[in-house]
Amino acid sequence: MKGRTVYVGYSVKEQLRQIFAGLEADYVFDIAVHPQHESRNELIELLEDTASCSDKISCTVRESEGLEFRILRNGEDLRICFQAVPNGHEFSSLLLAVLNADGKGKNLPDDATRRRIECLQGNATVTTYMSLSCTNCPDVVQAINVMTLLNPRLSHRIVDGALHENEVQQLKIQAVPSVWLNGESIHVGRSNLGELLDKLESKMGTDSSSQPTTEERHFDVLVAGGGPAGVSAAIYSARKGLKVGLVAGRIGGQVNETVGIENVTSIPYTTGKNLSSDLRTHLSHYENITICDNRQIESFSLQGSDKQLTVKGGEKFLAPALIIATGASWRKLNVPGESEYIGRGVAFCPHCDGPFYKGKHVAVIGGGNSGVEAAIDLAGICAKVTVLEFMDTLKADQVLQDKLRSLENVEVSTSIQTLEVQGNGEAMTALRIKNRLDETESILPLDGVFVQIGLAANSQPFAGELDTNRMGEILTDRNCRTAIPGVYAAGDVSDVAYKQIIISMGEGAKAALSAFEDRIKGIC
């Protein structure tokens, strides 16, 4: 076709031919689109380009009132409906939907998680509102797609908010990904399959009678957490010939949320997604590592000489040695109104949610590198950005501060304490703040606020048994040992200084070597 836009380039097509080479079933992208829809040609050409990479994939086009497509396998509707043009970050969601339907995907859950998905009760339609620029959206979309493929009672709509502005405005959605179940909002923001499954179970119920009794699983070493520290600990333990069980929410952990990474020695640049994928690939080289991801650790206990982890769903994991590497999560303000207005004015990711605040006035709470970088990004979208810092000076690198202060639509206020998020019941409208120098309170009218105040250690399941500091970090000696023999902590969950990827990797290795040394001595 003369003048036709190529949506999938030659090099990508070559990769797709390899990816699709093993497909066994026949797939159809069933496209339904209005003849005059502004994105009609883009959608059709993207899907036709993709389908051309395999004789197992084809396209059909029919007229409708809107724009959507479904994936059929051997003529059967897989109940996954894209009301979007899956370009950008969501292109991987399209590919994985096909590969997982064929049993070839890399993010299919293990048997225990699969049984939980299959036991969800009732019929339900899950709708995920996403943005093509959102780096967190694909994780949510792909997780729910997997559950839909495994449970015939689920259906999944993937909606691009930019193409359905009226629907987004009607529902007052101000953050993505936004997940709705049968018309009820159940989740906003980043997540993984395990967390989303928990929420579906709480809303839909589960047929526990169909689940077999969970057996205890025994290992030589347990690693709790799948980030850089946890993966490093697992690999170093496996290299000693030990049987390793890695229990985690997702491989990569917090690294998955990082857009660009430039400070891992020997790797000039990578992304959080790519590094997380590389971590999983490295784990797969060791047959004596069992990956148990999509797990939420609920409790830790001592069973004689064994250390036991119990996860959501009742599974129990035991080993004489436990390396805790559960990382950290974005810290919240913990002020009145914050939880109520998350996704309705309170946001945490400027890359994902910034476009919802185009031309509006927002605040960024936090004057460290993350906060200042967020403010710089938002200044290009929003009419005005106000930076609020608790301390008397910003903590960000000077080069970032210089850039920030050069922007005409940015205002910086220091020595400011946030007291309350205020709203009208539908969306936030203001912050109640206090000037710490003169103790005066005031109301700052806003359209939104981005919280960027650092990380909090994920130590809650262990806090009752292990000593922690005031920030919740597990106390360790210089070799990652805790006060309990046979229990070690590494990375951001520990009190080690400097929360960096490369330091976490080193601490994970150190914890594994300490555990092996103690094993030789008969300590664990």
Image (spheres, grey):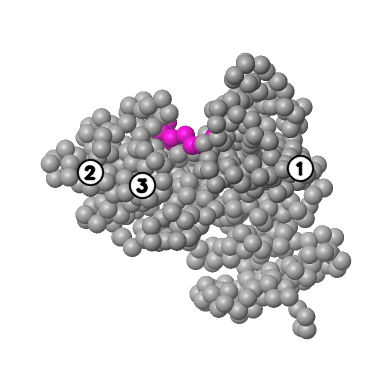
Circle 1: residue type:
Ala
What is the number of the mark on residue 503? 3
What is the number of the mark on residue 136? none
Q: Residues within 10 Å of mark 1 (few under 14, many from 20)?
A: some
Q: Residue at x 64, y 48 (%)?
A: 377
- In the picture, the quarter occupied by the N terminus is bottom right
Q: Is residue 53 left or right of residue 268?
A: right
- Per the image, the residue denoted by label 2 is 515
Q: Residue at x 75, y 46 (%)?
A: 358
Residue 254 placement (x, y as % from top left): 48, 46
Is 216 placed above or below 418 here? below
Quadrant of the rendered structure where residue 54 is? Answer: bottom right
Task: Specify which label sits upstream in the sequence, 2 or 1.
Answer: 1
Separation of marks 2 and 1 at Cα, in angstroms: 54 Å
- Per the image, the residue denoted by label 1 is 383
Circle 2: residue type:
Ala
Q: Residue at x 49, y 37 (%)?
A: 455
User: What is the residue that sits farthest to the right in this orientation?
Assistant: 36
Circle 3: residue type:
Ile
Residue 120 shows in the view? no
Is 486 placed above or below 251 here? above
Is 216 placed above or below 156 here? above
Q: Mark 1 or 3, which is nearer the eye?
A: 1
- In the picture, the quarter occupied by the C terminus is top left
Q: Dot 1 lies on which element?
A: loop
